[in-house]
Amino acid sequence: MTTVEGIDPRTGKGIAIEIADGKISAVRAAENTSSHYLSPGLIDLQVNGFRGFDLNNGEVTANAVLSLCEELLSTGVTTWLPTIITASEGAILQALEAIAKIRAGHRLIAEMVPGVHVEGPSISDRDGPRGAHPLRHVRPPSIEEFDRWQKASGDLVSMVTIAPEHEGSIDYIRALSARGVLVALGHTAATPGQIHAAAEAGAVLSTHLGNGAAAMLPRHPNFIWAQLADDRLTASFIADGWHLPPDTFKSMLRAKGMERAILVSDMVALAGMPPGLYDQPVGGQVEVSPEGRIGVAGTPYLAGASLPLSANVPIAAGMAGLSLADALLLATQNPGRFVGGRGRLEVGARADLIRFDWSEGDRELKVREAWVHGAKVFRT
């Protein structure tokens, strides 16, 4: 049996977590404990890349996937969904087949990666809501294509983002939901009626709500209000301070309620890279600013997200006036509901844990140690 001690972010008091067979066997009060905070590991349902490693460059390698796991652990992420964006069917199949094969041959990857998120290709074809996704590969949903994804990946696709205005999308959503696949709405120009019909058919998430949207929308009847109002949809948010202004994030969080909100990083390969200009397969010439903002060079447009959840958590707390403990819920227990109930400090739960330092005003959690399924896998 292993015992991990630390400070409970909720109470500020010491707690001890006992681990047996990869699961939490006891949670108890502790005195004279470690000075580090102790919480469940962070859970990120949307990662495209990080620190130069790219899942959407047309050639997913074992080194890239393992390196992403290791880099994410250093930021406190113990569970994540590799995210494949709109591309040709051949490119999607290559990525899925490669991830499945790599995952099957490496225990750490298998533990950290419970599934894959395919963001597209059935998103809006309009400039604005389409974002940086390539127009030439946008296409209507196809159950036959989805079946080919699952055949290539061994049923590893666990989440799909779709724009519900496509012809056939409601039947597609219903079919995926019946198979236990999470359907998220995103990169859409749908009407409110189409949003609600998608939720009725089984959609359960909104992908980075407020982004992947047209710059100008009707004041009242629009797809953002509809998704905020529909209690069947849990909204994911990019809380990096660039994708959503503080007032917008705070208002959206109040509208959805804490129980129907999660944080995602949506990081791209340039996240964590030095400032400068980069030529990218998605987005063309992209600039990383000294502050870390990633944008299309010479324009005001974002070209991806740059900050890990270890930064999004305290930034979200600052923007919305949340406690550290409440902000952590948005990156642990809440997204954990969509990956088999991970992210909980409860007896019987998986022992995915992190110890970290944080002080009021810090814009990042300083992760010191991480455990995945009871095994210590990272230490500074």
Image (cartoon, grey):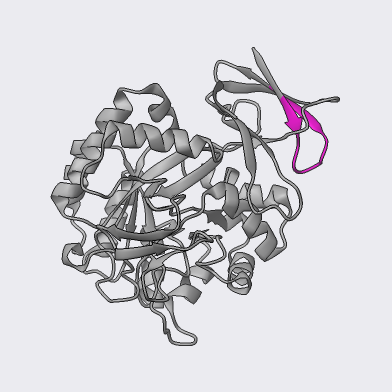
Q: Is residue 239 left or right of residue 132?
A: right
Q: What segment carries the magenta color?
A: 5-17
Residue 58 lies, with reference to residue 40, above or below; the image says below
Spot occupied by residue 189 in the image (x, y as percentages of width and height): 34, 75
Please name the residue shown 18% across and 62% down the image: 137
Q: Is residue 9 magenta?
A: yes
Q: Is residue 312 left or right of residue 358?
A: left
Spot occupied by residue 140 in the image (x, y as percentages of width and height): 19, 64
- Quarter occupied by residue 153: top left
Outermost residue on the bottom side: it is: 219
Viewport quadrant of the N terminus: top right
Q: Nearer the viewer, residue 97 or 221?
A: 97
Spot occupied by residue 126 in the image (x, y as percentages of width and height): 27, 76
Q: Nearer the viewer, residue 340 or 328?
A: 328
Please name the residue shown 21% across and 47% down the image: 58
Please name the residue shown 68% across and 57% down the image: 317
